[in-house]
Amino acid sequence: MQSFDAVVVGAGAAGLFCAGVAGQRGLRVLLIDHADKLAEKIRISGGGRCNFTNRDAGPAQFLSANPHFCRSALARYTAQDFIALVQRHRIPFHEKHKGQLFCDGSSDEIIAMLLRECEQGAVTRWQPCAVHELRRGAEAFELATDRGPVRAARVVIATGGLSIPKIGASDFGYRIARQFGHRIVETRPALVPLTFDAAAWAPFVPLAGLSLQARVQTGSGKARGEFLEDLLFTHRGLSGPAILQISTYWQPGSPIRLDLAPADDLGARLVAAKNGSHRKLVNELADLLPRRLADTWLASHRELSDRPLPDIRDRDLQQLASALQRWELLPCGSEGYRKAEVTAGGVDTRELSSQSMESRLVPGLHFIGEVVDVTGWLGGYNFQWAWASAAACARALAPA
Ligand code: FDA
């Protein structure tokens, strides 16, 4: 039976990074992945340019049943640390929006960088290779793999979440966690478009493809989320950064609230426009909102839509404005793991060490990356969690 100091299962963002760091710190590391292609999620991320971190990444942009868990790892391996690595590998990058850093060229450069780091650590990589079983023997863990049995004192589970099953996502990490007695915080698709009942959504279908800035909110108290971002109408519901962000906070059965003109007080603007304007309401509204939205919104209010503005009562204008700026909607679901960028929930962090990502129940077993119940906002935060949790784990595997 082949023997290693550590076996890392899953050669995605977290697994590749962890294997490289641990290898460079002197461990004999085996990295195993069942997918044919290496690190497909990195490749498709950020529209092919990989939003590899966020300059402002900190605990406030992460959700977890145990919100303090991510603090230590994020503080000990920061966005600046990863930026320094990217610069050392001479990968050109740029900032796009709110601290989001993207490759100028392609995501492949990040994958190549992580591979070079693994080579420098003399990491052995088996791919494609499935792991069928993980057992704790008397002295070490034993893994049954496509390429035969393997023994290691340490095992790191870095198999990610459930989103995008067609490129290799599996529930392996959760199954292993359960097998060893860990609890799982219920998983759900996150950073995902939201859908609505077909009949209720029918009036808005003509808006499909329309994008505008909106403020979106859901929840209350500590579970409240609020974002000011672009919103996109689709045939089945809503998407765009505003909705992907709020989807992580959204709980089935609860509403979301939208302000479709966040920079304006629409009521005041319409009432003020009565002085001097004899235009129809629909034309006045089209000065304040995209024309398609004004037309579609007023399509079911013909009695108002074509009336000259001065003929409409202030109260009716205020009511219309309020409907557009406090639009409450009840999603019926989401586009699911097929479209979700990440999986919220996962291995319960109360049974993991925040310093080393090691199981408190099974010494030598570690969980890193998305399989853990730590979910970041859209904008490079999920990769930063992958790097930070991997670094914490690798340092614990091979203390300096
Ligand atoms: P990751 O999913 O990267 O890797 C898991 C690996 O485990 C995979 O290689 C898989 O094949 C392997 N595996 C699974 N089951 C296995 C088994 N049974 N045996 C062996 N191997 C197994 N984030 C961000 O910060 N910026 C961005 O720009 C984007 N963009 C983006 C776009 C899209 C379309 C998606 C779907 C996701 C993103 N993300 C993102 C999220 C980001 O990709 C994600 O959070 C990280 O890749 C998570 O890293 P992990 O290493 O934990 O899992």
Image (cartoon, helix red, strand yellow):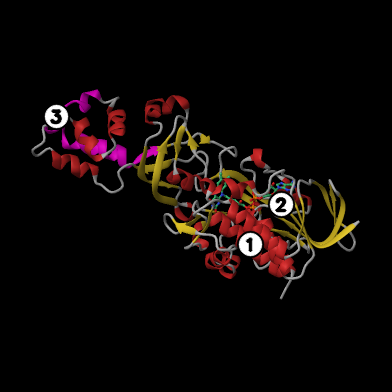
Quadrant of res 398: bottom right
Image point (50%, 53%), residue name: 377
Q: Image quadrant for the N terminus? A: bottom right
Residue 322 colored in magenta in the image? yes
Query: Which label sits in the foreground, 2 or 3?
Result: 2
Mark 2 CB near ligand 1 (8 Å cut) = yes
Residue farthest toward the bottom in the current orientation of the protein: 400
Quadrant of res 68: bottom right
* Residue named by callout 1: 389
**Magenta stretch in the rendered image:** 302-328
> Considering only order in the chain, which callout, 1 or 2, is on the residue closer to the N terminus?
2
Give the SS element for disc 2.
loop
Q: Main secondary structure of the magenta part?
A: helix
Q: CA distance from mark 2 to mark 3?
A: 64 Å
* Residue named by callout 3: 308
Image point (55%, 48%), residue name: 45
Relative vertical location of residue 253 with respect to residue 349 in this rendering, above or below: above
- Rendering coords of residue 339 (x, y %): 56, 39
* Residue named by callout 2: 10
Image point (11%, 35%), residue name: 277
Neighbour class for label 2 at 10 Å: few (<14), some, many (≥20)?
many
Query: Which label sits in the foreground, 2 or 1?
Result: 2
Q: Image quadrant for the C terminus? A: bottom right
